[in-house]
Image (cartoon, rainbow, N blue to C red):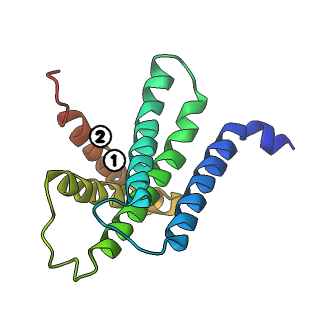
Amino acid sequence: MKWIKKNRQWAMLNLFALAVMVCLLWQSIAADDFNPNYDPMLISSGKWAIRFLLLCLLMTPLNTVLGWRSAIKLRKPAGLWAFEFVVAHFVLNAIGLRENWLQAPIPGYIAALGVIGLGILTPMAATSTRWAMKRLRRWWKRLHRMVREFRLSARPWPT
C-alpha cells in the first residue's frame, strides 16, 4: 500500500498507456481489411506516439519551471511508451504496404521524419536500463546529451 501511494502517478501513467495500447492492438486485430491510405489504427498509433513524446519532453520544464519534482520520475516511462507507440506505428505501416517495405521508398517528408524519430528513439530506449547505464558509463550521458542537443538544435524558431 505504501508503494502505491508513493508511485501513484507512475502507475496511473503506465496503466493508461497500457490501456491505450491494448485498445489499439485489439482494433488492429479485429479489423477485416487494412487500408494504408486511411486506417484509424495507423493514424491513432502515430498520434499517441507524438502525445507521449511531447509528454516526455514536457517533464523537464514541469520540474524546472513549476518545481514539480515528481515529473522527472515520469519522463522515462513516458519516453518508453512513446517508443512503443512509434514501433507499433512503424509495424502497422510496414504491414499496410503489403510489399517488400525495405525496397519501397519513404513516401514523403512526414514518413521520413517518422523514420528519423524511430532512429533517434531506438538507442534512447535501448539504453534506458540501469544495466546500460552501468555498461556505458560516461558514454550513456554523452548519448543522451547528444540527443538532447539534436532536439534543441532542431527548433523551428531562433534561440
Q: Look at the numbered discs 1 and 2 and tell me whether their residues touch, using CB distance below 8 Å.
A: yes
Q: Which residue is drawn at 46% across and 44% down?
A: 52
Say above or below: 31 vs 49: below
Give coordinates of residue 129: x percent, y percent. 50, 59
Q: How far apart are marks 1 and 2 (CA)?
A: 6 Å
Is 149 on the left-hand or right-hand side of 43?
Answer: left
Q: Which residue lies furthest to the right in this view?
A: 1
- Residue 148 - label: 2
- Residue 87 - label: none
Q: Residue at x 62, y 50 (%)?
A: 14
Q: Which residue is drawn at 14% across and 22% down?
A: 158
In this rendering, does residue 118 appear at all? yes
In the rendered picture of this protein, how many numbered marks are placed on residues? 2
Give coordinates of residue 120: x percent, y percent. 28, 55
* Residue position for label 1: 144
Quarter-of-image position of residue 104: bottom left
- Which is nearer the eye, 81 or 153? 81
Give the structural element (helix, strand or loop) at label 1. helix
**Kind of residue at disc 1:** His
Give the structural element (helix, strand or loop) at label 2. helix
Is 56 on the left-hand or right-hand side of 106?
Answer: right
Give coordinates of residue 142: x percent, y percent. 29, 48
Say above or below: 73 vs 26: above
**Kind of residue at disc 2:** Arg
